[in-house]
Amino acid sequence: MQSMAAREPLTVAHDDSAQDDLLAAVDLPAIERSPSPRRVPSLETGVVRGTASGLVVELGGGPVAARRAKSCLVAPDAGDRVLCAVEGEQVFVLAVLEGEAGATTRIVAEGDMKVQATGRLGLGAGDQIEIAAAREVGLFAGKLQVRAQAAAVAIEEIGLVGRSLEAHFQKAVVVAERMEARADRLVQRAKQAFRFVEALEQVRAGVYDLRAEGLAAVRGENTIVAARTLAKLDGEQVKIG
């Protein structure tokens, strides 16, 4: 019988350092990692569905909350067709494309707003212009011109301060319960003057001079002429009674 010698398994030693040297010797191109994809902003048109509790615009993917861009001065209303910029989760309304026929166009700005022009600035309307403010309206100009066929002014209290006043009227009517005029010098010129006083008229002056080129008449149911020092009647003819 042939004896069988026990065979030991062959062990193959792996040299890891040799493998590393082989990889280092091969000039492989560097692998570039592609950047993470970015969502590019897009433009979409939509319809405004609500403005009461916030601007809601219905786009292709459904209704989303949106904000009005600062450059979009026209405030959108429900049912308006708008142009939106979509960037990630943010939606901005850039412009109002069209709205309901005959609806009022409202220009609304958050905070203070100033309209300025280096040249002339004109404001016109085919029907009516209204200026309203909750607290104050100020007009500041080197020269102010107002032209109108008719004017109606209702003011509870008015105060005018100026250096000179010149007014030209064909007819002027002033109705007041009480009127006071104070001046260092008052000059009135008229071709005809009429005064009608129902109750009492008093004139108190340091010197009172009444002159008439024609007739000076003083008539009354009772007429009193009194002087503390001297009473004088002078004329070519003096008639009493």
Image (spheres, grey):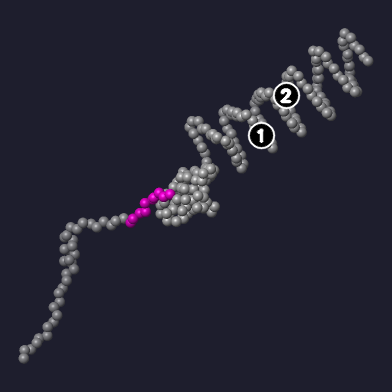
> Please, what is the three-letter code of the amino acid marked with disc 1?
Val
Which of 33 and 15 lies nearest the eye of the viewer?
33
Picture coordinates of residue 132, whole percent (x, y): 60, 40
Picture coordinates of residue 100, whole percent (x, y): 51, 46
Q: Which mark is residue 208?
A: none
Q: Is residue 51 above or below residue 207?
A: below
Q: Is residue 75 visible?
A: no
Q: Residue at point 61% right, 29% down?
A: 148
> In front: mark 1 or mark 2?
1
Q: Main secondary structure of the magenta part?
A: loop
Q: Is residue 93 found inside the magenta-colored segment of the image? A: no
Q: Is residue 69 above or below residue 224?
A: below
User: What is the residue that sits farthest to the left in this orientation?
Assistant: 1
The part of the image, by quadrant, that contains residue 183 is top right
Q: Residue at point 49% right, 45% down?
A: 99
Q: Residues within 10 Å of mark 1 (few under 14, many from 20)?
A: few
Picture coordinates of residue 226, whole percent (x, y): 89, 20
Q: Is residue 183 above or below residue 86?
A: above
Q: Residue at point 57% right, 35% down?
A: 127
Q: Which residue is mark 2?
A: 184
In the picture, measured across the screen, residue 88 lies left or right of residue 186, that is left
The part of the image, by quadrant, that contains residue 136 is top right
Q: Which residue is mark 1?
A: 153
Q: Residue at point 52% right, 48% down?
A: 77
> Please, what is the three-letter code of the amino acid marked with disc 2?
Asp
